[in-house]
Image (spheres, rainbow, N blue to C red):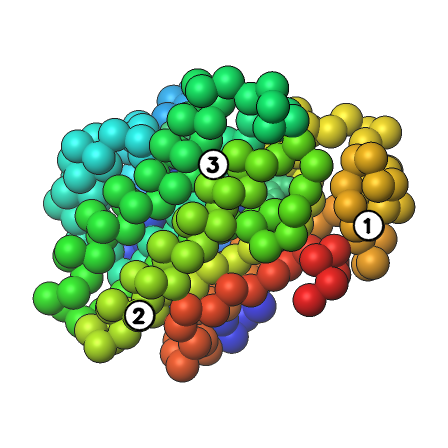
Amino acid sequence: MTAPAAAALSGVAVVTGAAGGIGAEVARALVAAGLPVALLDRDIPALWELAAELDAAGEGVLAVATDVTDSADVDTAVAKVEGELGPIAYLVNAAGVLRSGQAAELTDEEWDITFAVNAGGVFHTSRAVARRMVPRRRGAIVTVASNAAGTPRMAMSAYAASKAASAMFTKCLGLELAGHGIRCNVVAPGSTRTPMLTALQGDAAERASIAGVPDAFRLGIPLRRIAEPAHIADAVLFLLSERAAHITMHDLTVDGGAALG
Ligand code: NAD
């Protein structure tokens, strides 16, 4: 997180998936920048643990147990955030799930939960926040999608398709909200060192992903390392900040060059 981007941020921020690897790092960076931050996640023990850590680091940290697949739950959470912290200026959609497996073997349940969280969750939260931002003519939204949204990956069809949906939804929203002074952008990480990646890969597969073994991943990582969550948080904070004041509907890939573009 660079100091100038932090200096160009002010107002209340909401982070979904805040208890996860990337969401927590984004939340830490926003608290370090001095912002009141609402942490939304369905993993209640992890959420309270992060809230305790961040409470000690900043002011105005609010944890709200929320399931982003439930639009009523999301609406209630967003109302609670505005009631307790004030008008929301920033939203980061980082909640996500990954169910891997060959398409022919995927169950209906795996497909449905993938789309319910990764696409439906982004819709529910962005809609709830956008409705409040529009009359104020101020706000920025960043959706954490994936480089898999634009590059086919082995055994990731549901995940990649859901991420493509969330990325395009976010860009369409950006078009609709641009006239209201609200920017909507996408950050597309590649492999990032978080619990999601650990669950997917294990060490041997992580090495294969860096080297580019075709059975594991179609492409390697030209910069030869897995991203740290802070690399993703830096990109998110930049796109939220006034330093990105003329950037909207953009998809910023942060993957060490893995997508080759
Ligand atoms: P993670 O598993 O550490 O965190 C995901 C968080 O989302 C968890 O805290 C989980 O409880 C929360 N979540 C899941 N379903 C939810 C629901 N219904 N309601 C509320 N919260 C819910 O994973 P991460 O790596 O930090 O992933 C963050 C985002 O980055 C995800 O959208 C993921 O798809 C994306 N991403 C991750 C990688 C990677 O390699 N780690 C790569 C590309 C994109």
| For marks 2 and 3 on the same chain, the one whose residue lies earlier in the sequence | 3
| Left-right relation of 222 to 45 | right
Residue at position x 22%, y 35% from top?
Answer: 71
Residue at 47% of width from left, 59% of height from top?
186
Mark 3 and ligand 1: say if the CB distance to the nearest ligand atom is below 8 Å: yes
Find residue 258 and report its image quarter.
bottom right
**What's the amino acid at mark 1?**
Gly
Where does residue 226 sit, x and y in percent of width and height? 75, 46
- Residue 175's label in the rendered image is 2
**At label 2, which amino acid type do we have?**
Leu
The amino acid sitting under disc 3 is: Gly
Q: Quadrant of residue 177?
A: bottom left
- Tell me the CA gap for discs 2 and 1: 33 Å
Residue highlighted by disc 1: 220
**Disc number placed over residue 62 in the picture, else none:** none
Mark nearer the viewer, 3 or 1? 1
First in residue order: circle 3 vs circle 1: 3
Determine contact: label 2, label 3, CB under 8 Å.
no
Q: In the rendered image, which residue does mark 3 sit on?
A: 96
Quadrant where the image shows the N terminus: bottom right
